[in-house]
Image (cartoon, rainbow, N blue to C red):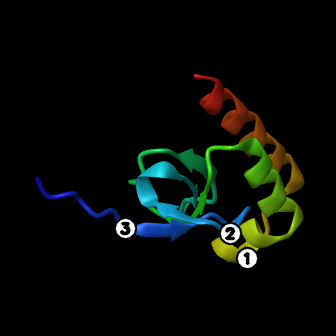
Amino acid sequence: MIERKYPQRTCIGCRETKDKKELIRIVHTPDGQFLLDPGGKLNGRGAYVCPDPACLQKAVKGGNLSRSLRTQVPAETAARLYEEMKAFVAE
């Protein structure tokens, strides 16, 4: 049986390289929204982060999220994404 290879992406929080399917995409849509995109299919500029709220927090604090999305992420939006990430991981 042939083992399938998955594309690799780097988490913007911990900087570890993992399979794309193991990470969650955060997307900045063309209409200006910031969303979690677990399926990785939404239109817009994306950045990948581990499904761990600590990695997201590290990415926001270090400025990696804003740099990867090429736009400033407001503090209240980052807090909302953090809460959504916690809820997503708890499922």
| Picture quadrant where residue 68 is located | bottom right
Q: Residues within 10 Å of mark 2 (few under 14, many from 20)?
A: some
Label 3 to label 1, Cα distance in Å? Answer: 22 Å
At horizontal 28% and vertical 64% (from top left) the residue drawn is: 5
Q: How crowded is mark 3: few (under 14 residues within 10 Å), some or many (20 or more)?
A: few
x and y percentages locating residue 7 in the rendered image? 37, 67
Q: Residues within 10 Å of mark 1 (few under 14, many from 20)?
A: some
Label 3 to label 2, Cα distance in Å? Answer: 16 Å
**46 to 67, vertically: above or below:** above
Task: Name the one closer to the observer, 65 or 16.
Answer: 16
Q: Quadrant of the C terminus?
A: top right
* Secondary structure of the residue carrying numbered label 2: loop
Q: Is 37 on the left-hand or right-hand side of 59?
A: left
Q: Name the residue under label 1.
A: 67
The residue type indicated by label 3 comes to: Pro
The residue type indicated by label 2 comes to: Arg
**2 to 70, vertically: above or below:** above
At horizontal 63% and vertical 63% (from top left) the residue drawn is: 11
x and y percentages locating residue 69 in the rendered image? 65, 71
Q: Mark 2 points at which residue?
A: 15
| Picture quadrant where residue 86 is located | top right
Q: Earlier in the sequence, mark 3 or mark 1?
A: 3
x and y percentages locating residue 55 in the rendered image? 74, 53
- Kindly tell me whether residue 42 is visible in this rendering: no
Label 1 to label 2, Cα distance in Å? Answer: 14 Å
Q: Nearer the viewer, mark 3 or mark 1?
A: 3
Q: Name the residue under label 3.
A: 7
The residue type indicated by label 1 comes to: Arg
Question: Which residue is farthest top?
Answer: 91
At horizontal 72% and vertical 73% (from top left) the residue drawn is: 71
Q: Nearer the viewer, mark 1 or mark 2?
A: 2
